[in-house]
Amino acid sequence: MDTLRNMRVFVRVVESGSFTRAAASETMTTAQVSRAVTDLESRLRTRLLNRTTRRMSLTEAGERYFQSCKRILADIEQAEAEAAAAHANPAGKLRVYGGTSFGQHYVMPLIARYQQHLPEVSVDLTIAQQMPDIIEEGFDVAVVVAAELEDSALISQHLGSTAAILCASPAYLRTRGEPQSFDDLEAHTCLHLTDASLPAGQWVSEGPLGETFRHTGVTPFQVNNPEALALAIREGMGIGPLPVPVALPGLADGTLVRVLPTHTLQKLNIYALYASRRYLDAKIRTFVEFLREKVPLVLAEQEAALATCDEPLHEVDAHADARGTRARSGRGRSHNTHDLERLRLVN
């Protein structure tokens, strides 16, 4: 019989005042209860109880040990209750990893909405390019974007898929012309986003007919941050790939133009990764369930917003200002209040 169990039996004997009553409450025989107390005394080399045929009393050492046992057992009960509650009630700190672009534009807004429903959960979000060792570094959930996942012992939940789009500034297109096919891109300045989820130094684009274009030429500019790349594209430095939420504001105000709108870059999958499916902590379970519900909705909202910006470029106003506002023949670009509010919510 283990020491913890013996301590519980000893406390029960003292509180009930009888070996017989303690045996009944613990579903044991009187002999088993007596042996439990004897084992404790042998282990401690100290008498805990003075026993006669008529009465029982604590020794001085037994009194001190009794009080210590009650504190220890109370702490254990509290720890067990808290652990059981963690499985049922979302609370405490949730450590989340998100990739640089996806973490900022998707995970961060969703965390805000998650905490509106579950304010008892505090979130520690880390945004970085390189995915950490989730178990080694103590993360509860990682939200990653990748063409494929590497083999691992982690549990994965597929949340959806996304792809970057090619963009340029109106000023660049006025000067260099608008490419009509991927073959035309060979004559253009191509900028690179060096993201951990993208093939290094190249574009892999999938068109409506399944054709693929890989740009492996020299680029005059590359950067690992999509917002910085968007600024470079707005400055007319060339054509580059942007995540949809980064491109949407520029497409909406005309400072960016989508190039080859029927094509996207390589489709990337979005996953939630966590350590174990068994006895999953409630805050992890509810957060993953929230992501599974909301990420597809956000992606659909962005596709709808993108569609409002994807009217074919008919002509570029020769008198556009330095920001390169796009003008359209017979149908000027406009976004009503609902459209703009949707763009803000998406971003």
Image (cartoon, helix red, strand yellow):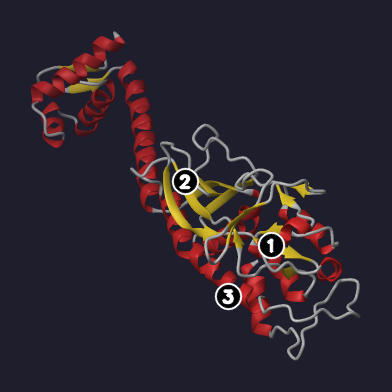
Q: Residue furthest bottom?
A: 330
Helix, strand or loop status at disc 3:
helix
Of labels 3 and 2, earlier in sequence is 2
Helix, strand or loop status at disc 2:
strand
Q: Which mark is residue 15?
A: none
* Relative image position of residue 107 (x, y in whole percent): 58, 56
Does 120 appear above or below 67?
Answer: below
Q: Mark 2 is on which residue type?
A: Leu
Task: State how far apart marks 1 and 2 are (Cα).
Answer: 29 Å
Q: Which residue is mark 2?
A: 273
Horizontally, is 216 left or right of 113 in the view?
Answer: right
Of labels 1 and 3, earlier in sequence is 1
Task: State how far apart marks 1 and 3 are (Cα).
Answer: 17 Å
Image quadrant where one finds the N terminus? top left
Q: Nearer the viewer, residue 302 or 5?
A: 302
Residue at x-position 16% and y-position 34%: 26
Camera-nearest label, 1 or 3: 1
Does 301 appear above or below 244?
Answer: below
Q: Which residue is mark 1?
A: 166
Q: Mark 1 is on which residue type?
A: Leu
Does 180 appear above or below 225?
Answer: below
Q: Nearer the viewer, residue 94 or 157?
A: 157
Mark 1 touches mark 3? (CB < 8 Å) = no
Helix, strand or loop status at disc 1:
strand
* Relative image position of residue 71 (x, y in whole percent): 38, 31
Residue at x-position 43% and y-position 47%: 156
Q: Is residue 54 visible?
A: no
